[in-house]
Image: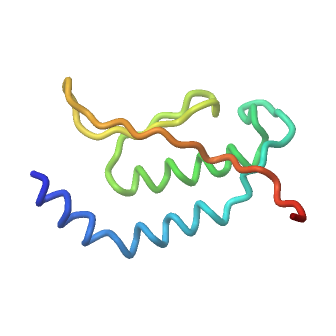
Amino acid sequence: MEEDIILQVEALSSQMIDDIKKIVRCPSVEGEALPMAPFGKDIAMTLDETLKIAEKLGFETHNLDYYIGWAQYGEGDDYIGIIGHLDVVEVDEG
């Protein structure tokens, strides 16, 4: 199974790099809280884009009122969890 995962990652590596670039380009600094965007519209947009990429890769995605989103694959007791965040600190001099 490990070899299958490695082969799949190698096959998708170019697309993964493009998708990471797309997410990194998203402005994701916390903004004014809005309905369905508790951390601002830019972070909500970034979460949408990230979950769209995950769906394209075959994951089942979930969005909990824009407070948290996750992607999962498969069913059962065994799974892998990866924790991360999409927001960044505002760009400033220095």
Tell me the residue at 46%/56% (across/down). Answer: 53
Tell me where residue 25 appears, x and y as whole percent. 66, 66
Q: Given the current orientation, which residue lies at the most extreme front position?
A: 94
Tell me the residue at 87%/38% (across/down). Answer: 32
Relative to 57, 74 lies left or right: left
Tell me the residue at 42%/51% (across/down). Answer: 54
Tell me where residue 12 appears, x and y as whole percent. 31, 69
Viewer-side residue, 44 vs 5: 5
Tell me where residue 64 appears, x and y as whole percent. 56, 28
Query: From what the image shows, is residue 94 above or below residue 54?
Result: below
Tell me the residue at 35%/38% (across/down). Answer: 72
Q: Given the current orientation, which residue lies at the most extreme top position?
A: 77
Q: Given the current orientation, which residue lies at the most extreme right position?
A: 93
Tell me where residue 56 appears, x and y as whole percent. 39, 57
Relative to 31, 65 lies left or right: left
Relative to 36, 16 lies left or right: left
